[in-house]
């Protein structure tokens, strides 16, 4: 492995130096147009693909209180919520599974290696977010192979003001959410921090929750030393998980408690025609899952005698990466390498430990008896060309994993500007995803593990267009993805246990469309979105937990308008039709029913005060995002935010 690592660095470094030696002496291409590294937290260049984004102002107007609900408003994004208040949700795109989406915080990969169920455990307030970028599909410059079907990048700390803001939200089901944040800018330094709490008694029995967040970020900018960005965040969640992982009435009293720590440091500097970027990162995640909360069933009787203890997991992910881009007359050459270590301790997942380990943060005699470590060396190299109105890129990325050896991906992208700020695209990419620790090792009274899983892979062809004229904008794309060895938890209707397996071939065709208008005096924003997915899946009579259930149709309509002076309102209508079925508590096979939701917010605000009232699921529609887990019906909330 050491030989492979040093050889990779030598090859990439030699290529970069060679290009520098042969490049013509000319002015570099404008960084604002082509560089994926111009801001260390940008996803990718928008010259070669459609990247949907939503701004701070648009987020502030929506009737949402957590990131999970916010993402569900975005076109082409599927968020399957189990509980309310942002406690847990599965994020997927383009008919993929929740493990196939890369989640980034300011450009840092924070995707959970234990399970994608926890990838959205993010310690950030909505009011701290400057924008969210959504990339459908994959990109060579995103380290790792997790961006199988798409990526989400949450960006903070861009627009710093000298102020302190306090807010409080209350609502149905005992909702109580106080928060305090502040930001300060002086000379070359920016500082931002926030603390918050959220709790609820739950919309049905055993759906209560408590959530605490802390997030701090600082950045420094200087021509001589470059740009430095530091972020540190922590989160704890405790929530009732009524039937989250089984609709069997015996398992309705499930419970989950998680702790998340995120830390990173990034540096970026221009050196002549080079743009250099490096980062170091660390993520720790602790999870205690109780199949029987406090060793009791929902009616208060003791858990069965076979249930001895809860499941405990502790994951540590740390590493560092380096990227470099060189700008010449013809375009940009970008290369990068990353070292990423992933480790887990558990009493369920991994290989048997020689010496058991104590479980931190818990008052229990149970110990970690299993563990696993895997080391990743990720790399990419990409050449982009910009000739008048034509753009093109070709690249390769790879991963050498201590468990799965060497895997690689590649891509080719083309773009043409047919009108100012308007382009057409054609992309062809190969992507891979490594199994999570849960995919490989999870076993329980209802699950069978499969440590022999192989990485899943796909080939995707996409064509798209982006059209912008003054305040009007639109995006459209069509894609075809040929997936092989797709990982899923499946079982036959007559079986009692789910098993993890590479579920043969899944070919997916689909498309997304969005169009909108921004900025008029009365109409602040109006947007429609629609996505369609159709998969040719070899189900073989299997029931699927995830991969065989996909969002076939999703339509959204968002409308924000002024009422009078400082009064305004925003409305959101969403329609969903999910393919697939689930088995209810009585063992009956139930098809997913389509449903529509209507949410709204009315507000009054000026530069210092924002007062609002909102309601989600105004019509009290009875609906299910995942399986037979009932979602909240009408939920009314009100809040006030004051800035000093």
Image (spheres, grey):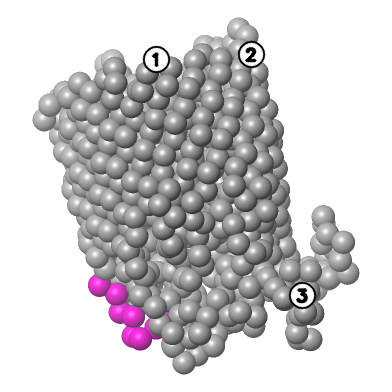
Residue, x 48% and y 22% (percent of image)?
A: 604
Viewer-closest of 500 and 453? 500
Q: Secondary structure at mark 2?
A: loop
Q: Are marks 3 and 1 in contact (CB under 8 Å)?
A: no
Q: Main secondary structure of the magenta part?
A: loop
Residue, x 20% and y 21% (percent of image)?
A: 470
287 vs 529: above or below: below
* Quadrant in the picture for the C terminus: top right
**In the rendered image, which quarter is residue 560 located in?**
top left
Residue situated furthest bottom in the rendering: 494
Report, in whole angstroms, how far the alpha carbon at label 1 lies from the one at label 2: 22 Å
Q: Is residue 51 left or right of residue 181?
A: left
* Quadrant in the picture for the N terminus: bottom right
Say if the magenta span includes residue 537: yes
Mark 1, mark 2: which one is toward the viewer? 1
170 vs 276: above or below: below
Q: Residues within 10 Å of mark 2 (few under 14, many from 20)?
A: few
Viewer-closest of 250 and 462? 250
Where does label 1 land, which residue? 565
Lower sequence index among marks 3 and 2: 3
Residue, x 41% and y 39% (percent of image)?
A: 600
Residue 300: which numbered mark, if any?
A: 3
Mark 3, mark 1: which one is toward the viewer? 1
Residue 644: which numbered mark, if any?
A: 2
372 vs 5: above or below: below
**In the rendered image, which quarter is residue 468 located in?**
top left
Residue interval drawn in magenta? 536-543
Q: Are marks 3 and 2 in contact (CB under 8 Å)?
A: no
Q: Residues within 10 Å of mark 1 (few under 14, many from 20)?
A: few
Report, in whole angstroms, how far the alpha carbon at label 3 lies from the one at label 2: 48 Å
Lower sequence index among marks 3 and 1: 3
Report the number of discs: 3
């Amino acid at each position: 492995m050491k030989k492979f690592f040093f050889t990779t660095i030598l090859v990439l470094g030699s290529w970069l130096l060679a290009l520098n030696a042969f490049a013509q002496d000319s002015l570099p291409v404008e960084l604002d147009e082509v560089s994926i590294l111009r801001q260390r937290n940008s996803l990718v260049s928008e010259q070669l693909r459609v990247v949907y984004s939503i701004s701070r102002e648009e987020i502030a107007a929506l009737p949402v209180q957590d990131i999970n609900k916010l993402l569900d408003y975005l076109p082409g994004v599927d968020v399957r919520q189990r509980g309310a208040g942002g406690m847990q949700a599965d994020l997927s795109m383009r008919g993929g599974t929740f493990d196939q989406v890369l989640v980034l915080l300011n450009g840092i990969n924070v995707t959970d290696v234990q399970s994608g169920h926890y990838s959205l455990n993010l310690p950030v307030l909505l009011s701290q977010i400057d924008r969210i970028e959504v990339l459908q599909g994959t990109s060579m410059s995103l380290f790792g192979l997790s961006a199988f079907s798409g990526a989400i990048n949450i960006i903070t700390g861009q627009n710093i003001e000298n102020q302190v803001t306090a807010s409080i939200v209350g609502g149905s089901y005992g909702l109580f959410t106080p928060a305090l944040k502040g930001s300060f800018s002086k000379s070359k330094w920016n500082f931002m921090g926030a603390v918050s709490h959220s709790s609820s008694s739950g919309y049905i029995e055993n759906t209560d929750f408590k959530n605490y967040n802390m997030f701090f970020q600082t950045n420094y900018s200087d021509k001589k030393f470059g740009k430095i960005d530091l972020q540190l965040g922590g989160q704890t969640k405790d929530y009732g998980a009524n039937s989250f992982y089984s609709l069997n009435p015996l398992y309705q009293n499930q419970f989950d408690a998680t702790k998340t720590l995120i830390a990173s440091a990034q540096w970026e500097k221009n050196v002549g025609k080079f743009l250099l970027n490096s980062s170091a990162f660390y993520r720790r995640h602790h999870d205690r899952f109780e199949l029987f909360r406090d060793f009791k069933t929902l009616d208060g009787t003791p858990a069965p005698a076979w249930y001895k203890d809860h499941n405990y997991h502790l994951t540590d992910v740390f590493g560092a990466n380096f990227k470099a881009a060189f700008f010449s007359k013809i375009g940009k050459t970008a290369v990068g390498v990353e070292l990423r270590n992933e480790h887990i301790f558990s009493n369920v997942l991994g290989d048997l430990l020689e010496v058991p380990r104590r479980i931190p943060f818990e008052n229990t005699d149970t110990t970690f008896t299993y563990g696993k470590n895997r080391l990743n060396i990720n790399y990419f190299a990409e050449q982009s060309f910009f000739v008048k109105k034509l753009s093109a890129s070709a690249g390769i990325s790879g991963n050498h994993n201590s468990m799965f050896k060497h895997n690689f991906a590649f891509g080719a992208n083309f773009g043409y500007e047919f009108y100012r700020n308007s382009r057409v695209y054609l992309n062809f990419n190969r992507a891979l995803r490594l199994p999570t620790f849960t995919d490989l090792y999870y076993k329980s009274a209802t699950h069978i593990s499969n440590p022999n899983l192989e990485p899943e892979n796909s080939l995707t062809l996409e064509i798209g267009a982006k059209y912008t004229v003054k305040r009007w904008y639109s995006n459209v794309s069509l894609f075809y993805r040929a997936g092989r060895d797709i990982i899923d938890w499946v079982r036959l209707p007559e079986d009692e246990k789910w098993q993890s397996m590479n579920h043969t071939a899944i070919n997916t065709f689909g498309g997304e469309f969005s169009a909108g208008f921004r900025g008029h005096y009365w109409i602040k924003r109006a947007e429609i979105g629609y996505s369609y997915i159709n998969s040719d899946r070899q189900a073989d009579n299997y029931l699927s937990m995830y991969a065989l259930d996909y969002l076939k149709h999703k339509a959204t309509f968002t409308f924000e308008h002024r009422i009078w002076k400082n009064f305004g309102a925003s409305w959101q209508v969403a329609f969903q039709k999910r393919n697939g079925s689930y088995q209810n508590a009585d063992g009956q096979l139930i098809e997913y029913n389509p449903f529509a939701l209507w949410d709204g917010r009315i507000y009054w605000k000026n530069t210092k005060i924002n007062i609002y009232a909102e309601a989600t699921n105004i019509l009290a529609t009875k609906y299910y995002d995942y399986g037979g887990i009932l979602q909240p019906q009408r939920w009314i909330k009100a809040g006030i935010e004051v800035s000093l």
